[in-house]
Every structure is written in C-alpha cells, then in structure tokens.
Image (tube, helix red, strand yellow):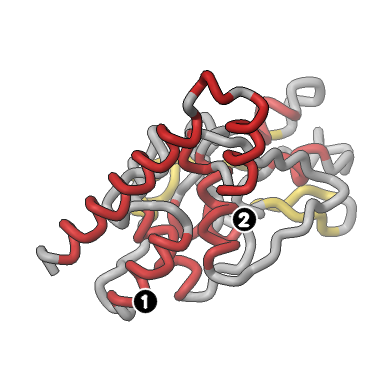
Amino acid sequence: MIQLQFLAQVDEEKCTGCKLCESVCPAGAIEMVANMATINADRCIDCQRCIDRCNKENAISRAPRPSELIRCVDHSDVDQLQLKTLCGKAGLLPDMPICGCTRTTGKEAVAAVLKGANTPEDVCAMTGLRAGCGIYCMTRIFQVLEACGIDVDNPPDRRWIKLTLSLSDLPEEKVKQIDEAYPQCCVGQDWRKLKQRHVHSAAKEDTHV
C-alpha cells in the first residue's frame, strides 16, 4: 500500500511528443494523444520516471493531487484458497512483501490479477508496485502473472529483465545442471532446504486461516 499526494503533469507548450516518457511509465499512466503526452491520474503512481526521462525538455513535473490517494488491493473478497495456491505457485508466501519500497505483499499482487490485472502495468497501477526503485519487484510481478497463467511478452519499447533474486527462484533442472558442474558447492542441498522451508512456512500459515 502506498499513499499518493502528487501526480505527473505535462506542460503542453514544452512537450515534443517524443514518447520517451510513455515507454518508461511502469503503470501505463501515459499515452500519446494528438502527439502530446497525457497523464491518466487514476493510474499514476508518482514514481517520477517520466520526469527523469524528460530531463532535456523538462515538459513533465509533479503536481499536488486534489486529495490523497491510497493505492492498494483488498484481498479479503477473493477466494482465499485460490489466493494461497497461486502465491505458492509463484514461490511467494502470501504475507511476504515482494517490494521493499512499498511493502506490497504477494497476496495483494495476486489479488490484483484475480481482479482483472493482466499486464505488469495493470499490477503496478492497482497496487503501487514499482513506485520506488522498481527493479527487484518486477521479477515478482512476472512470477505472479505466470503463476496465474498470463504470458508476458516483451514489448518493443520496454526493457523488462527477469532477474533471479534468490536460489529458490531457480528451476530444479537448472539446479541439477549446476550441481553436476560444481558438486563442491552443494547448491542442490541448499536449494532443497529452501524449498522445504517454504513448504513448512506455507503450512504454518494455513493453520492460522
């Protein structure tokens, strides 16, 4: 959950229609209309990437919102079993934050998809994810979408990089390859312990439902 007090605004006299801001917006809040950047206030998460990208023309700035906006997704009204199942499929604990900047949890991201989000931009616009550094949480967004059966294609105007954030993110086949090449590192042993810990933690959470 994040609290938004500002949003991006465009100076129409300075905007050149270069589309650079549109390509870096993580929430899909910018689109070109009549060769002019326009801001969708309902989607803007005040990440300020558009401002940084428009540093040459300085056509975009921050403006106070008329009223503070809370960006979060209520997960209490979705199927809780389905929610936990999808979190597990994504390799996430439901209450574990998947973003260090916004503290958005795995179950909130999954709930966003269950409520209609089907792109990384939709997930960001609904939850506020990527409002901070926007680097590591992108990997978790990919995992959530894939667990929900949504394939994400790399658009030509974006640079999306799927990072491996921990040993437990590696598929078993890759772990076996590493084990065969570097048996002295005991990667497989560590990987199995992490997986077992995840299963144990998930089972522990189930007892509190």
Provide the residue designation for mark 2: 121
Q: Nearer the viewer, residue 179 or 139?
A: 179
Bin the neighbour count of mark 2 within 10 Å (Cα to Cα): few under 14, some 14-19, many 20 and up: many
| Residue 42 in sight here | no
Kindly indicate the quadrant of the structure image that contains residue 57.
top right
Q: Is residue 183 visible?
A: yes
Could you tell me which quadrant the C terminus lies in?
bottom left
Q: Position of residue 104 (x, y in %)?
A: 36, 47
Q: Position of residue 200 (x, y in %)?
A: 23, 52
Q: Answer with mark 2 or mark 1, whichever residue precedes in sequence.
A: 1
Residue drawn 44% across and 47% down? 65
From the viewer's perspective, is the residue at label 2 or at label 1 nearer?
1
The reply to whether dot 2 and dot 1 touch (C-beta < 8 Å) is no
Disc 1 element: helix
Q: Please name the amino acid that badge 1 sits on.
A: Gln
| Drawn side of residue 109 relative to residue 15, left or right | left
**Relative to 86, residue 189 above or below:** above
Cα–Cα span, label 2 and label 1: 23 Å
Label 2 sits on a secondary structure element that is helix
Out of 193 and 124, give the one closest to the viewer.
Answer: 193
* Identity of the residue drawn at 52% across and 29% down: 133
Q: Amino acid at mark 2?
A: Glu
The total of numbered circles placed on residues is 2
In this rendering, position of residue 94 left or right of residue 192: left
Numbered mark located on residue 82 in the image: 1
Q: Residue at x 74, y 32 (%)?
A: 59
Q: Is residue 119 above or below residue 36?
A: below
The one of 130 and 175 positioned closer to us in this rendering: 175
Q: Give me the residue at 68% from left, 35% from top.
A: 50
Q: Quadrant of residue 11?
A: top right
